[in-house]
Amino acid sequence: MATPITNRILTLYSLPQIPHSLALLPVVNFIPAYYSDNLGLPIAMVGLMLMLTRLTDVITDPLVGIASDRARTPIGRRRPFILLGLPILCTAAWLLFVPPQDAGLGWLFACLFAMYLGFTLVDLPYASWGADLSNDYNERSKITGWRGAFGAIGTLAALSIPLVLQVLGRHGTGEMLFWIAIFFVVCQPLAFAIMLAMVREPRPETINRQHPSFWEGLRLVFRNGPFVRLLAAVSLATAGMVIGATLNLLVLTHMIKAEDAFPPIIFLQNIALLLGIPFWGLLAQHFEKHTILAFCSMMVAACLAATVFFGEGQAVGFGACLVLLGFALGGVIFLPPSMVADIVDQDIVDTGQERTATFFAFLGMGTKLAVAIGVLVGTALPAAIGFQPSDANHAPEVLVNLSLVYAFSGLPFLLFAALLVWRYPLSREVQEELRHRISSMGQQ
């Protein structure tokens, strides 16, 4: 039986997401620009390193997910993986965010590889723990909504750092990354220590005690139609959003000519994200989750396309597009984990086993590969049009092409994602029927 969902449980479970949300945010928003602008590495090669290290998740994510579902230890099946991954994640994040001045592509690759491994060991069990907390369609949205809101709070706390530094007259991406790293490596272990000590891990929901074999288990995962559709949609939407996120700082610096506007714009974007989570969560109580997810994907696409109307000196209009995008992003972030929890009900009917972490592993693998593809596209396309951040001057046509790449290269990904989930088959009524079938199976 899952732990009753009280505000106390929701708060304690969501607490680690405050620093945890920062683990990958700088990788997309700051690392490409910092390693190319400040350390002088070719931007296309930086993007390639980000993509190559993500390919390792094809192996590590399924292994960690399946192992977490099958693990039976005195301290639970999720805790051991979180405890193993935390020191790896924190050490790698520090070395990535605070590199020596002579750091090259090898340093970048090694730090990213270790950071992604640590993140997988922590994040998959942590996300699965949340999905295990409730069997109810609406409560699952509430859990992921709380976790997403705490993540937005953490992002706002970190993004306040560059604002404070600006007030103090201290500028530069390097110093900003230093203080974000301090925040992360101190707060992440502390928050997880509180959560692991105070929240009881739910017992696995098992009807048939015979686990499917490794290959049979994988076959059943990819025969799960709703999951395959959701996996494709989330991966596409993520790739489309990451293309824009990768270029945010570069576009503001070189095209809008307003580098100092980046911290306040991203800060306001995350406030909008924080406000969007309860808004989309409230809608999810009355409409289908997949319908809202499709709408949010289209809204993100429209916001990116609208940036094409803004150029040098128009940071306010450009920033307004990004803030509105953040509001839509709230729905894109928090709805898929809730939908995976519903998908697991179908798997329980099929296998008799609760394999939450396995499904989160493949969703995470798809998302991480999508991040890598988004970063690669977001760095390769500017290089292909002749844009290099370290150049002192850029021809006007290069900046126009950069604007077009930023506004439109992610649109096919986002619109196709919306199309995939528009006719998603696992509705509220279907999920309630699955829970009824699971209850009947358990009584036999």
Image (cartoon, helix red, strand yellow):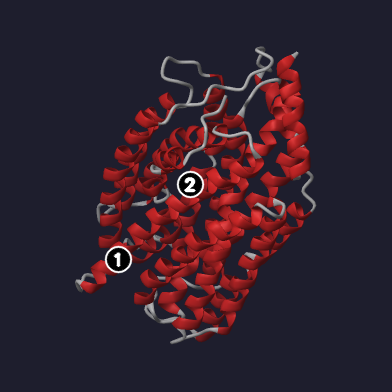
Question: Considering the numbered disc 2 on the image, is that residue within a helix, a strand or a loop?
Answer: helix
In the image, residue 118 lies at what x, y percent? 41, 36
Residue 390 visible in image? no
Provide the residue designation for mark 2.
147
Q: At 55% from the left edge and 81% from the top edge, which residue is drawn? A: 400
* Among the 4 quarters of the image, the one containing residue 410: bottom right
Q: Residue at x 75, y 29 (%)?
A: 436
Q: Taking 112 as reference, is 423 left or right?
A: right
- In the image, residue 65 sits, relative to residue 190, either above or below, namely above
Residue at mark 2 to residue at mark 1: CA–CA distance: 24 Å
Q: Is residue 248 left or right of residue 89?
A: right
Quadrant hosting residue 221 = top right
Q: Is residue 72 above or below residue 292?
A: above
Residue at 27 percent across and 52 percent down: it is 98
Q: Earlier in the sequence, mark 2 or mark 1?
A: 2
- Residue designated by label 1: 162
The quarter of the rendered structure image containing the C terminus is: top right
Q: Is residue 279 visible?
A: yes
Task: Name the residue rendered at 51%, 26% in the picture.
Answer: 202
Looking at the picture, tell me which residue is in the foreground, 125 or 443: 443
- Name the residue nearer the viewer: 370 or 220: 220
Q: Residues within 10 Å of mark 2 (few under 14, many from 20)?
A: many
x and y percent of residue 238 in the render? Answer: 59, 54
Q: Amino acid at mark 2?
A: Arg
Task: Kindly report which numbered mark, 2 or 1, lies closer to the viewer in this rendering.
Answer: 2
Q: Decide: marks 2, 1 in contact (CB < 8 A)?
A: no
Decide if residue 195 is on the left or right side of residue 306: left
Q: Position of residue 82 (x, y in %)?
A: 41, 31
Numbered disc 1: secondary structure? helix
**Few, some or many C-alpha atoms within 10 Å of disc 1 (few <14, some 14-19, many ≥20)?**
many
